[in-house]
């Protein structure tokens, strides 16, 4: 092969692996239908478009969800649309034609364009974005990488995610950090009350506040920006756990004013399962130790956090088509739709005797995730009844002071499925 023909071959092969070319799978499969659907709701604001079932039927058909169950546990992990599944399969087939060549020579070259697109979605600089596998990896990298010493204090809350709580407790046990947890009774519609709770826990030893942007148990949206501004006034840094907010809430990470942010992309962005992202404010990167080995651990280059050895390049590159799909809907329209779905079922069950909601109906303080319980019935029994009798898949939550069933729709969720949920809750409550 001549040098000229080899370069042409590499360019053509790279184009096959690019989600951001004119030949993307999303453009081939959904470009025309999504554009036509968007034109049909162009005169509607996002809240109005959220209720246009003709528009959302186009989105629903892009998923391959099972007709045998009603999946309302998207808070754990969301299914990828068909285009993302097919992208991963295409990249996997390409990889196995010659792994060491196509992985390192072709797909690895797609990380920088992917980093750029994630940065655009996050409203951040590309050099602040690291691509990893999930929120736990992203946030544990930050937690274990912060240069803290014995006696330094960290404030979190009891309703944070267990893996983050465990990480801070491990640092406290091993290094003598002081890890304090405050507690909340959700739902709370008063941002100032939440900010005050963190501020009242501060002492002269406090160095970090760890806050969950959207509480995974009941969907409470925490006022991260207000907490960050308060913390910075006390010379305290803020870590934001955005596992459930990124790809769902229409925001830009720097607007949260936090210092560190980690998320899973396989939740509401609907990227391949096992994908995540970490954001670190650029002037903090140098001081954070990598969780895994790096040639220069004090490098200011965000890429030092990506030296994790061999990974699944097909899964990583599949993120690109998930971004295309997300932007094909539009972040504001998507947030409004999922918030509408959450309120659709929750407003209909709140008046049922013995039924109690654990999530705000105010979409300034909630969005997708909703908690519901039935007096006299355990969360586990409630969740089991929903599945055994009605094939509605949810999850029972028993964590600290939260005891409820978590219900989480997504853009593919159909209104008639939520009607079945409402009917099921009414039946179960009547028999409880």
Image: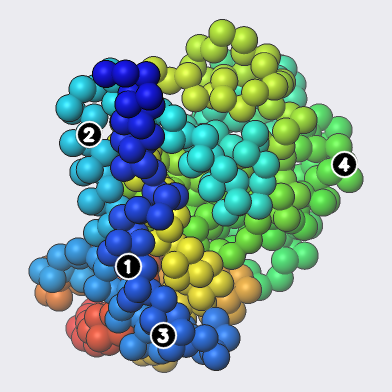
Q: Which of marks 4 and 2 is in front?
A: 2
Q: Nearer the viewer, residue 275 or 2?
A: 2
Q: Which one is earlier in the sequence, the residue at label 4 or at label 3?
A: 4
Q: Which residue is drawn at 71% across and 70% down?
A: 190
Q: Distance between the residues labelled 4 and 3?
A: 41 Å
What residue is disc 1 on?
Answer: 30
How packed mark 4 is, by other alpha carbons closer than 10 Å (few <14, some 14-19, many 20 or more), is some
Where residue 73 appears, x then y in whole percent? 31, 62
Asked if disc 3 and disc 2 are in contact, CB closer than 8 Å, the reply is no
Q: Which element carries disc 1, helix, strand or loop?
A: helix
Q: Which one is earlier in the sequence, the residue at label 3 or at label 1?
A: 1
Q: Which one is earlier in the sequence, the residue at label 3 or at label 2?
A: 2
Q: Which residue is drawn at 57% across and 15% down?
A: 174
Q: Which element carries disc 2, helix, strand or loop?
A: helix
Tell me: 38 left or right of 354.
Answer: right
What residue is disc 4 on?
Answer: 234
Looking at the image, residue 52 lies above or below residue 205: below
Q: Which mark is residue 344?
A: 3
Q: Which residue is drawn at 28% across and 48% down?
A: 87
Q: Which one is earlier in the sequence, the residue at label 2 or at label 1?
A: 1
Where residue 287 appears, x then y in whole percent? 71, 21
Where residue 173 appears, x then y in whole percent? 56, 20
What residue is disc 2 on?
Answer: 94
Q: Which one is earlier in the sequence, the residue at label 4 or at label 2?
A: 2
Q: Distance between the residues labelled 4 and 2?
A: 52 Å
Q: Which element carries disc 4, helix, strand or loop?
A: loop
Residue 394 seen anywhere in this rendered image of the structure: no
Q: Nearer the viewer, mark 1 or mark 4?
A: 1
């Amino acid at each position: 092969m001549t040098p000229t023909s080899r370069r042409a071959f590499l360019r053509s092969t790279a184009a096959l692996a690019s989600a951001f070319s004119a030949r993307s799978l999303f453009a081939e499969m959904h470009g025309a239908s999504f554009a036509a659907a968007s034109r049909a709701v162009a005169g509607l604001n996002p809240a109005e478009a959220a209720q246009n079932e003709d528009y959302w039927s186009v989105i629903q058909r892009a998923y391959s969800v099972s007709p045998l169950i009603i999946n309302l546990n998207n808070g754990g992990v969301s299914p990828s649309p068909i285009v993302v599944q097919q992208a991963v399969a295409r990249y996997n087939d390409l990889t196995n034609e010659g792994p060491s060549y196509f992985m390192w020579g072709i797909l690895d070259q797609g990380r920088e364009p992917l980093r750029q697109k994630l940065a655009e979605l996050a409203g951040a600089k590309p050099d602040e974005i690291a691509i990893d596998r999930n929120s736990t990896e992203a946030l544990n990298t930050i937690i274990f990488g912060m240069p803290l010493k014995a006696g330094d204090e960290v404030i979190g809350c009891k309703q944070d995610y267990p893996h983050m709580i465990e990480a801070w407790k491990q640092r406290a046990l091993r290094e003598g950090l002081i890890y304090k947890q405050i507690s909340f009774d959700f739902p709370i519609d008063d941002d100032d009350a939440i900010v005050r709770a963190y501020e009242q826990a501060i002492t002269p030893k406090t160095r970090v506040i760890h806050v969950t942007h959207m509480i995974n148990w009941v969907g409470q949206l925490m006022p991260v920006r207000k907490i960050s501004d308060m913390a910075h006034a006390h010379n305290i840094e803020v870590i934001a756990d955005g596992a459930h907010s990124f790809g769902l809430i229409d925001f830009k990470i720097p607007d949260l004013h936090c210092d560190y942010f980690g998320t899973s992309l396989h939740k509401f962005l609907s990227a391949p399962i096992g994908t995540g992202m970490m954001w670190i404010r650029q002037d903090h990167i140098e001081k954070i130790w990598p969780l895994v080995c790096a040639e220069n651990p004090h490098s200011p280059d965000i890429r030092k956090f990506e030296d994790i050895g061999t990974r699944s390049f097909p899964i990583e590159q599949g993120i690109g088509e998930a971004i295309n799909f997300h932007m094909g809907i539009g972040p504001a329209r998507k947030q409004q739709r999922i918030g509408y779905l959450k309120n659709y079922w929750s407003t209909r069950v709140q008046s049922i005797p013995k039924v109690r909601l654990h999530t705000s109906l105010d979409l300034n303080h909630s969005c997708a995730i909703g908690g519901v319980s039935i007096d006299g019935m355990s969360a586990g029994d409630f969740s089991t009844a929903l599945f055994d009798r009605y094939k509605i898949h949810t999850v029972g939550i028993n964590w600290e002071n939260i005891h409820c069933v978590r219900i989480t729709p997504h853009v593919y969720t159909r209104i008639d499925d939520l009607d079945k949920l409402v009917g099921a809750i009414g039946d179960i409550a009547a028999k409880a």
